[in-house]
Amino acid sequence: MTLLPWLVTAWLFGIGIYGIVTSRDYVHIIGSLSVCQSSTYVLLLSIGFRWHSGPPIFYEHPPGTASVDPVVHALVLTDIVVGAAVTALLLVIALQVHKRCGTTDPQQLRPLRHTK
Amino acid sequence: MSAAETLLPLAVLAPLGAAALLALLAHWLPARSGDCLAIVTSIAVAILCGWIADHALHGAIPHWFGGWTPASSHRSDVVLGIGFLADPASAAVACFCAFLFAMSFLFAWGYFDEVHSHFHVLMLLFLAAMIGFCLTHDLFNLFVWFELMSVAAFALTAYPLGQSSLEGAFNFTVTNAIASFLMLLGVGLLYARFGTMDISLMGREIGRAGSDPVVLAGFCLLAAALLTKAAILPFHMWLADAHAVAPSPVSVIFSGAMVSLGLFGLAKLIVQLFAGSQAVVAVVHGPLLWLGAATAILGGLMAWSQRHLKRLLAFSTISHLGIMLIGVATLQATGIAGLLLYLLGHGLVKGALFMVAGILLARHNSIDEIALYGKGRPLWPAGLAMVAGGVMLGGLPYGLLHSATHLIDGQVPGEAASAAMIVSGALTGAAVLRSALRIFFGWSGAPGPERAAPTEREHEMPDRPMILMMLPCLILTALALAPASLATPFITRAAPRLLDPFGSGAVALPTAGGVSASLATLAITLALTLLALLRHRPTSSGGRAIARVERAPLAAIDALHSGLLPDYVTWGTVGLALLASCAAAFGFT
């Protein structure tokens, strides 16, 4: 395995965090969070990858044929499902916040610290 | 397979099934059926988990899903299946969670009438996730339960759909979602290195690998994730926002069970997975212990300077999690026994206190200590529960928390950590006691630093049966006042079995003692309370100067808790970097 997927993972995670930290909009934060999450996909898929091997489907191949690791695929699928749930929930919250406050700028939205 | 092995998954399946049934039938069932089904289910799960915990004393109880036992792979170094493994401590923690849910459902009777049974569906899902988190013995499965627990908690926080609750839920969701990504990265790294997800097998492999850099990186990522859930400095910022704005019955669960479960998960991973790695043990003994002490002090100071009662209780939870982390960091069976006892005692006390806050919200549409001055007099039983809770947090030399503190204190190296435990206990105890005496007994004193703290007018569903709100609150308080000797015979045998699920024997706990430390804490608690209640408005220039000096440091740490999500994420990143540099320093020297 080369160094590239590790670097991509670190870059994606870092740039996602940078996006969240510097963001001035809830929707942008949600997008940055998804970038962060995609770093986990890259890492997991690169862990399971084997050079010169096929998909883990043994329909036309005898058992024992080299294949990539199917376990990490299952992990990535679970991760995607969870990510979709969290993103949906966050978008609903952002929508409700916009309805109530007319803004989605985190600098103006602080729980319990609204001045009357 | 024995009956216990067969029934083990039922502890998770029952709440999941009840949740699905309720979601399906909510529109047709009569109004109160959701409450009834939820209470019955959680009590049944508590009984089942208690029975399993008792059985597990004779040997940990495994359940391999689909019959994929380790033997079915015909190789000693390959585990194909995904398993639950109930050691007595884990099953007992699951039992406690289910019991707290039953109390919370009772307390919430009639709270969520307009929304059919959606609240109960989410809560039952939350319960199932917590129990799965306690019982699982597979690293990825642990991540799944962690994630499920988080998602249910996010939705429950946003439930009131008020401005603060939405913002609090947003901060909570983003910080904890990042934590779960860190956890997944950690799980991925460890799987890449060892090729298995089974915790026992991976633990043996880690023991052989020693201080491998991948093990250290995996530990840092997993620890950062679980410390975020457990709200340890500097990952703790989200907690005060989320706990303060969630509906009271949900705050009971958050503070009493969810966050301490994060710490319990961390303890379990450290002792079962990473105990073989010298570098990780060094990190836990050193930096994590001091992190715990610092968290305890900071949480105490913040709690002391709050006026919003739920926010005050949330910071006191942070402080007590710090003390529990000190218990984890001892890595001794006695310290772990202390942790288990503390988890129980703290959950009971904090559950009762959040219920008192909920009663005030339902009756008086406010949760502000100063605005509520003297208004709680007709609700004196709740006031007594709150005073009892404050005195227990503040070092009453009796009850579960006292014994637990004594057990942890005995294992702590050096005086500084013991002093941190005394100071933080006194600060949180005095904060609760001060509010209780102001609200329920009309004692006052000019407000000090707490006057400038954030607050808000809030309300919760009024006209609920007072008896059903008061009853669980008083039950929890009474249980917290039970003598620890009732729990010790179980805990002495459960603690060594958490360190090694297949081990045996019992740890000899030090006999009753530690009264002097508790009395010292209690003296400081009472002194601080009196100081707050007898305070006058400073009129002389000297008095004003003293008040300024007092306010400045508290205002400074309050400014750090800005309520801004970007700040919270930045602090989390700093914490991860700190953890990584500690691990690197211990791993490569």
Image (spheres, coloured by chain):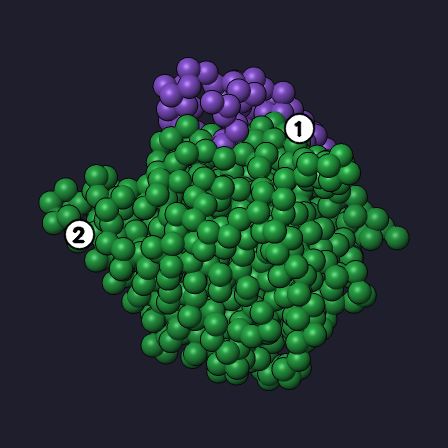
Chain colours: A purple, B green
- In the image, is B272 to the left or to the right of B247? right
Q: Kindly identify which numbered label has been placed on residue B119.
A: none
Viewer-side residue, B214 vs B175: B175
Pointer 1: residues within 10 angstroms few (<14), some, or many (20+)?
A: some
Chain to which mark 2 belongs: B
Helix, strand or loop status at disc 2: loop
**Residue B540, percent across and down?**
73, 37
Residue occupying the far top of the picture: A102
Task: Judge whether residue B202 can be spotted in this image.
Answer: no
Residue B229, above or below B327:
above
User: What residue is rendered at 44% in x and 74% in y?
Assistant: B53
Q: Which residue is labeled 2 in the image?
A: B32
Helix, strand or loop status at disc 1: helix
Q: Does the residue at mark 1 contact the one at mark 2 (Cβ under 8 Å)? A: no
Chain to which mark 1 belongs: A
Q: Kindly identify which numbered label has been placed on residue A14.
A: 1
User: What residue is rendered at 69% in x and 58% in y?
Assistant: B423
**Residue B116, percent across and down?**
20, 42
Viewer-side residue, B201 vs A32: A32
Residue occupying the far right of the picture: B589
Pointer 2: residues within 10 angstroms few (<14), some, or many (20+)?
A: few
Task: Judge whether residue B412 can be spotted in this image.
Answer: yes
Residue A71, above or below B100:
above
Amino acid under disc 2: Arg
**Residue B566, percent across and down?**
61, 27
User: What residue is rendered at 14% in x and 42% in y?
Assistant: B27
Q: CA distance from mark 1 to mark 2?
A: 49 Å
- In the image, is B18 to the left or to the right of B485? left
User: What residue is rendered at 11% in x and 45% in y?
Assistant: B28
Residue A78, above or below B130:
above
Amino acid under disc 1: Gly
Q: Quadrant of the N terminus of chain B?
A: bottom left
